[in-house]
Amino acid sequence: MWWGSPDKGRTKHMTQHFGYEVDRLYLPVLLPFRFKRDRDGVTLSGDAFEATLGFFTVTTARDNITGAHITRNYRWWTAFGVRGSRADDGLSFGTNHNAGVCIHFAEKVPSRLSKSGHSALTVTVEDLEGLTAALGGDPDRDS
């Protein structure tokens, strides 16, 4: 983490980066996406939210985020890579099948998989509680 320069009306803002928790068994599947462990993840800076996994990126304003909560125990065959949900319009950036943070948006965010957008994004970051709290969610509430 590093301290940014002052914004109007603010003394300082902090840029936070949350890297992925990677199950090494999934690396052969993640590498074709051009996944880079030291670069990819979720970055919060000022009023911006950006999540990357290889050549896939989701960006939005932080005030478009309506909630975040921790989810756990995914089926292994649906847990890795970039994929859309069959149940709803959600998107996942998955690097393990243990746990992630589901982030909900007021207005759908577009991606390479859906120009009409996604109302939620699940990311399997290392610091589940830290990202959930940074986005205004309750890190003690799992779903």
Image (spheres, rainbow, N blue to C red):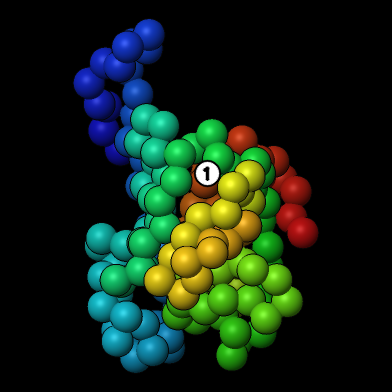
Quadrant occupied by the C terminus? bottom right
Residue 60 lies, in percent from the top left, at 44, 46
Q: Kindly give the residue lying farthest to the front in the view shown.
A: 116
- Classify mark 1: residues with Cα within 10 Å, few (<14), some (14-19) or many (20+): some
Which residue is pictured at 36% across the width and 62% down the height? 57
Which residue is pictured at 42% across the width and 58% down the height? 58
Q: Kindly give the residue lying farthest to the left in the view shown.
A: 5
Residue 108 lies, in percent from the top left, at 57, 54
Q: Is residue 119 visible?
A: yes
Q: Is residue 133 visible?
A: no
Which residue is pictured at 54% across the width and 34% down the height? 63
Q: In which quarter of the image is residue 117?
A: bottom right
Quadrant occupied by the N terminus? top left
Which residue bears the numbered disc 1? 130
Observer-nearest of 72 and 106:
106
Which residue is pictured at 29% across the width and 84% down the height? 31
Is the residue 137 above or below the residue 14 in the image?
Answer: below
Q: What residue type is labelled 1?
A: Gly
Horizontally, is 4 left or right of 56 in the view?
Answer: left
Residue 65 lies, in percent from the top left, at 58, 42
Is the residue 115 above or below the residue 103 in the image?
Answer: below
